[in-house]
Amino acid sequence: MVIVSWKALANVFKRSYKFFCIVFLLIGFAGGILVPLAPGIISADSSSLSTFSGPFTVKVFGYNTHFRSAKSSLQGWITNEGKQPVNTCATSVNVIDDTHLELSFPPVAPLNDPLFGLTVYNDADGRLYMNSAIATTDTVRGGIVPACNPVVKNEKQDHFAFPFRYILYESMRNLFFHVPMWFTMIALLSWAVVNNLRFLRGFDMKYDRMANNAITTGIIFGLLGLITGSLWARVTWRAWWVDDVKLNGTAITMLSYLAYLVLRNSMEDEQKRARISAIYSIFAYVMMIVLIGVLPRLQGTDSLHPGNGGNPAFSSYDLDNSLRVFFYPAVAGWVLLGVWIYSVRYRMSNLKENLAAAEVKSRIA
Amino acid sequence: MNLGRQTAALFKREILNEQRQKYALYGMLLYVVSTVFVAKFSFRVIKDVPAWNALFWIILLFAAATGIARSFAQETRGRMLYLYSIADPRAVLLAKLLYNCLLMCFLGFTGLAFYTFLVGFPVGNTGFFLAALFLGCITLASAFTMISAIASKAGNNFTLMAILGFPVVLPVMLAAIRLSKHAADGFGWSGGAAYFGVLLAMNIVVTGLAYLLFPYLWRD
């Protein structure tokens, strides 16, 4: 049996964490910025789909697609999304460039659903599908549907890429920056609370310095999380700030920690300051748990975040394995960076303390 | 003397104190009534349930902030020292907590009576609404009691009380407003159970934290 002492483990961590921090951050940045997005269809414009008196064309706008270079295997078809989907193939394909395409279709009447899904296939991109891509206002149901069976060789493109998601698109990369900020903030604030409790047990000022530096570093990461989240919201939700339980909860949390700073600076006496701010910090931490851990998860609250207000969690359908490869290192890297910043600040405050003590000593002597 | 009896004795002292300076209680009541009058003159009658509900809770919030800020600030330093030397500090806190809960409930229910009289009472499920009001008042009181203790230790100004209290009280207000809106809309216990649970949990957590942390706070 091998017995490893906590001290030895802590020593190994202390010696190696900066290395791992840099490696993980590099993986997170490199993967997050360099890995391309899988090809997909951004939008489809149809001409005169409301009549069905004659053939119509659909303009397809692709993203990261290879329409021109894989022209020979290109096929396009629309699928009426009824109970029994029926495919209708394009009669001619007009490739404009790698991302633009015009498909011509014979007259089609909707079976039992006014919505059509659009699929474009070529050997390089695989099967690209857009849900409810085109719609018709035609009320005639059960008309003639020219059916066909498209030939599909490879379902998915085989090189490594992030999944293509409607609305999210490239902003998906923010996952590697926005989410780790919160992990880091929670980690630092939890460490602060641990040290607040340790301080209240023995009134050792060392723990007060630990807690205070963890909180100030945590606040920085919280603000970074708000900024990255705000940017993401602008791209996907079209607003810098939306009325969302999670956003409001985070804003209140940040305010309570800013109030902690005000409270701390309003007192002169060090012991008293440490004691009272420790008590308030424990309070603020518990409130944070309620605000961003409990309240948003209740049913019936309005939230746009995945995993909140009754929404499915990100990982249940969106966190593709290709994202995981970079997401976990990114989280670890940012958390370690937080620990690094914290430890520098903490050691600096220790040095300041020693300096002050030395000055007092020299004055007495 | 055990904690319970000490608390009871100190609670009696709080009530006696209030009786001796009745102007403070009347002042708070007048505050609530005049705010309700302001609401009356600005809105006449509020038919919109969410607005009615939110306005009522905002009135209560400010009543709580002004009323409970007093609870630790009014004690002189000497009197506090005397209390701590004869009683357990936790008993001092519990007595203040109980008294503030009572005070908030009194303000809440009399406030509601005036509010109903002047602005209207568009509530669907009255029993549930009163339960929500009771729980909300108690939670507001316990949250503010601890904040008032912290603020009184740190220079004792009202600005600090507002800054510190706001983030702690906001989730309480949020849950209370949602819960009482749920009741005012006429829904029953089944749908509001989650918020009721949150409010109750928050109450227990805040009171528990105050109980555990106060002995560290009072010493100078």
Image: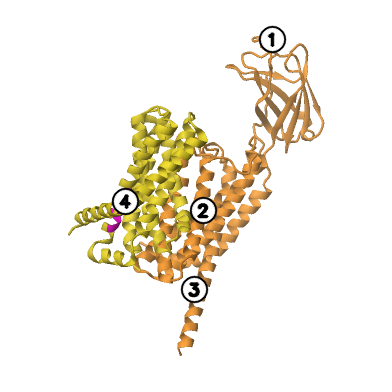
Chain colours: A orange, B yellow
* Label 4 CA crowd tier, 10 Å (few <14, some 14–19, many 20+): few
**Measured along the vertical axis of the image, is residue A201 above or below residue A187?**
below
Residue at label 3? A350
- The residue tagged with tag 1: helix, strand or loop? loop
* Label 3 CA crowd tier, 10 Å (few <14, some 14–19, many 20+): some
The amino acid marked with disc number 3 is Asn
* Quadrant where the image shows the C terminus of chain B: bottom left
- Image side of residue A321 versus residue B208, left or right: right
- The residue tagged with tag 3: helix, strand or loop? helix
The amino acid marked with disc number 1 is Ile
Numbered disc in front, either 2 or 1: 2
The amino acid marked with disc number 4 is Lys
The amino acid marked with disc number 2 is Leu
Residue at the far bottom: name it: A365
- The residue tagged with tag 4: helix, strand or loop? helix
Residue at label 2? A255
Residue at label 1? A144
State which tag comes first along the sequence, 2 or 3. 2
**Measured along the vertical axis of the image, is residue A139 above or below residue A177?**
above
Whole-angstrom CA distance, mark 4 to mark 2, is 36 Å
State which tag comes first along the sequence, 1 or 3. 1
User: Can you see residue B187?
Assistant: yes
Whole-angstrom CA distance, mark 2 to mark 1, is 63 Å
Residue at label 4? B22
Q: Are marks 4 and 1 in contact (CB under 8 Å)?
A: no
Rendered image quadrant of residue A142: top right
What is the span of residues highlighted in magenta in the rendered image? B92-101
User: Can you see residue A173?
Assistant: no
